[in-house]
Amino acid sequence: MAKKQEKLANEAVRNYSFLKEMYEDSYFPNKLVDKGKAILVGLCFEIEQKQPKTLDELYELTHAATDKFNDLQDDFEEADSEIETAARECIAEDFEFVSKAYGFEADREELVATRDW
């Protein structure tokens, strides 16, 4: 994606270590965690580009990103891993961090409401 070459405007997300706990746990293959990180960074670019004004507009973007995590589940299973409790918490926390970094007080569960993990 060419977008990754661009720089995020929001310094907090630019300097944030996405999915840190998953990178620190060898149960989660780094190449798959990298894909998860790319989803979250992509979400930040979407927020900066579309500039949602309401929580509903934000949730539309976070649900689309959550759906991309749903699509990663098979990849994790093929690598003898899964998006389990620790991963779910880590991912949801990062969604919440992103929402706060862009000035939203969003419900963590609603941010990832479309998850099937």
Image (tube, rainbow, N blue to C red):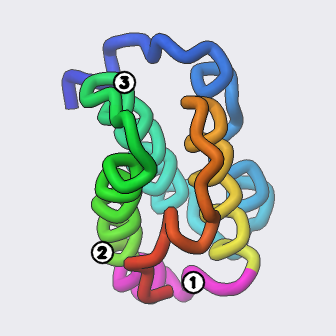
Residue at the spot x=47%, y=56% of the render?
36
Instruction: Give the mark count.
Output: 3
Residue type, mark 2 in image = Asp
Residue 83 coordinates in the image, percent (x, y): 57, 80
Query: Left of 24 or right of it: where is 35?
Result: left
Query: Left of 32 or right of it: where is 106?
Result: right
Residue at the spot x=58%, y=21% of the render?
14
Local packing at callout 3 (Cα closer than 10 Å; few below 14, some 14-19, many 20+) is some
Give the quadrant of residue 18: top right
Identify residue for label 2: 71
Q: Nearer the viewer, mark 2 or mark 3?
A: 3
The first of marks 3 and 1 along the sequence is 3
Identify residue for label 3: 48
* Label pair 2/3, CB-CB below 8 angstroms: no
Residue 20 coordinates in the image, percent (x, y): 74, 49
Image vertical order of residue 55 relative to residue 3, above or below? below
Identify residue for label 1: 81
Q: Gap in Å between the C-alphas at discs 2 and 3?
A: 24 Å
Q: Give the range drawn in magenta.
A: 73-85
The first of marks 1 and 2 along the sequence is 2
User: In terms of depth relative to the viewer, which is nearer, 47 or 22?
Assistant: 47
Disc on res. 110? none
Image vertical order of residue 38 relative to residue 49, above or below? below
Q: Gap in Å between the C-alphas at discs 3 and 1?
A: 32 Å
Give the quadrant of residue 33: bottom right
Give the quadrant of residue 82: bottom right
Q: Which of marks 1 and 2 is in front?
A: 2
